[in-house]
Image (cartoon, grey):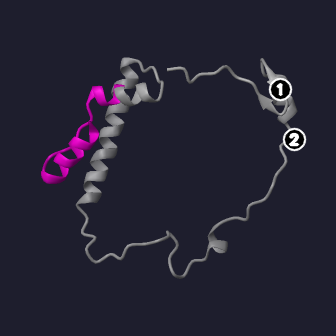
């Protein structure tokens, strides 16, 4: 559904892409979300703003911009911008598990939810 609109948007420069109430309901259904009417309208408006911004980005002239394989520039190195991965023990895991309704250390046991 969104794919058809995206194609139409690309062909018509002055057309503003809008997401419908039905689109939001479909995405919410796929994510197993139950939205109130207020939430539905809030998310529809937020997605509209995102799509409008993407539309503005599509207007940028990128003809002379080289494709990038990574986000670091030539003068940056990974070790200068990223922290080192370190193992940090979690000292509260057993305390948290004690508050769970059905713990089986070191995990939480939860009911199956994928039954649709």
Residue at horizontal 79%, vertical 31%? 107
Answer left or right for 101 relative to 54. Answer: right
Q: Which mark is residue 91?
A: 2
Answer left or right for 116 relative to 62. Answer: right
Residue at horizontal 37%, vertical 21%? 38
Where is residue 27 shown, x and y percent of the image?
39, 31
- Location of residue 73 with respect to 83 vertically, above or below: below
Q: Report the front residue among 21 and 1.
A: 1
The residue under label 1 is 104
Answer left or right for 32 relative to 88. Answer: left
Please identify the residue farthest to the bottom as the structure is shown. Answer: 75
Residue at horizontal 21%, vertical 42%? 5
Task: Please tell me whether mark 2 sits on a helix, a strand or a loop.
Answer: loop
Where is residue 21 shown, x and y percent of the image?
28, 26
Task: Identify the image quadrant of the N terminus.
Answer: top left
Q: Which residues are magenta?
A: 1-25
Q: Residues within 10 Å of mark 1 (few under 14, many from 20)?
A: few
Residue 13 visible within the image: no
Main SS of the magenta segment? Answer: helix
């Amino acid at each position: 559904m969104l794919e058809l609109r995206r194609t139409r948007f690309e062909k018509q420069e002055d057309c503003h892409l809008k997401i419908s109430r039905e689109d939001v309901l479909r995405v919410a259904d796929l994510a197993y979300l139950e939205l109130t009417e207020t939430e539905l309208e809030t998310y529809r408006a937020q997605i509209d703003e995102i799509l409008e911004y993407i539309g503005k980005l599509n207007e940028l002239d990128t003809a002379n911009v080289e494709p990038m394989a990574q986000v670091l520039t030539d003068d940056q190195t990974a070790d200068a911008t990223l922290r080192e991965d370190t193992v940090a023990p979690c000292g509260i895991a057993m305390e948290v598990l004690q508050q769970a309704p059905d713990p089986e250390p070191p995990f939480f046991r939860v009911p199956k939810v994928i039954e649709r």
